[in-house]
Image: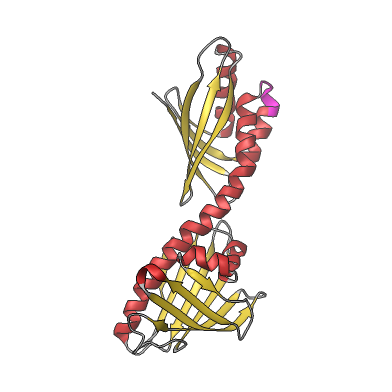
Amino acid sequence: MSVEQEGGGSGAVELSVEISASAETVWGIFTSAKGFSDWWEGQVTFEPRAGSRFRAEFPAYRIVLAGKIVTVDPATRRLALTWGVESGPDADVFPAGSSLVELQVRPGDAACRVELRHTGLRSPEAAAQQEGGWRFQFSKLDLKANRADLAAGLARTLPEWLAAWNERDPDARQAALARCCHEDIVFRDEWTALSGRATLGMHIGNCHHYMPGYTLEHTGDQRICRGEALVGWRATGPGGQPVEGFNHIHADPDGRIRRVTGFQAG
C-alpha cells in the first residue's frame, strides 16, 4: 500500500491511497454492510443508497459512529456519507453526522487507488487524529481486499501450477506455466535457483527424467498476506515416503505468479 498526502486545509483530511486489489473488489467493500464490517472489524449497518442511516458499533472499544449515506455513484465509484461519534470518546465535540467523508475508487492495472476527503472537522488537531485513523484503516483495507482478490486468483492459477509440475509433455507443460506464471518468474528451492518460464519448464522436465513417477499435490494449507501466500505441498513417488513442504509465493492480485521459494519440511 502507498499513500500520498494531498493539499488539505484546516479541519480536513485528504489522502490518495494505492490498494493492491481491483476497483470492483474495493467498491464492493465500500457499498456492502458486510464488507464494511469486515474491513472495520465492527458491526456496520447501512444500505447503499442516499438517505440510508449509517451506523458502526465497536463494543470492545465502547464507541458507535453514525451518520447517513449522502451519495452512492456506481458509475464513478464514489461514496459520500456523514460521519461522527454517536456514543463514546469525543461524542460531545465530534457528534454523529457532523463531518463529511468522501471516498472514490479509481481503477488501475494490478491495483486501484482510493481517494479520501474528510471535511467538517473542528480543528487541524482533530484532522491529524482522523488522518492517523484513516491511514490505519486503509492499511487494513489493502490487506483484506488483496487477500480476497489473491485467494480467487490463486484458486485459478495454482491448479495450472500443479498441472505444469505433473506434466511430462514439454509443450503442454509450457502452456500450463504460461497460464499461471509471469515470463520472468523466479523459482528457488533446495535443488535449484532459476528465472524464466522456459528454464523452469526444463527444470521440471529434468525432475521427471531423474525422479520418474513422482507427482505433486497441494495439501490445502494456505495463508495469504499482502500479495504473498504460503501454500502447502506434498510430493509422492513410487515406493517412497511422501515429501512435504510449502511454497512461499509472490503473485499479482489476479493470481499470476511472480516468484516462488520452496521449502521442504523436516
Q: Magenta segment, principal secondary structure?
A: helix
Q: In the displayed structure, would residue 155 be above or below residue 14?
A: above
Question: On the rendered image, what quadrant is the C terminus found in?
Answer: top left
- Which residue is at 42% across, 89% downward? 120
Farthest residue toward the left? 125
Residue 253 in view of the camera: no
Q: In the displayed structure, would residue 206 be above or below residue 58?
A: above
Q: In the displayed structure, would residue 44 be above or below residue 207?
A: below
What residue range appears in magenta?
Answer: 168-172
Q: Where is residue 42 in the image (x, y as percent from the top left)?
A: 46, 67
- Quadrant of res 239: top right
How many dots with numbers?
Answer: 0
Residue 17 painted magenta: no
Q: Is residue 263 left or right of residue 54?
A: left
Q: Which colour scheme is used?
A: secondary structure
- Quadrant of res 172: top right
Q: Position of residue 82 (x, y in %)?
A: 50, 85
Q: In this view, does 175 lie to the left or right of 54?
A: right
Residue 177 in view of the camera: yes
Q: Where is residue 55 in the image (x, y as percent from the top left)?
A: 50, 78
Q: Between 201 and 264, which is closer to the camera in this rendering?
A: 264
Question: On the rendered image, what quadrant is the N terminus found in?
Answer: bottom left
Q: Position of residue 180 (x, y in %)?
A: 62, 40
- Quadrant of res 51: bottom right
- Which residue is at 34% across, 72% downward? 132
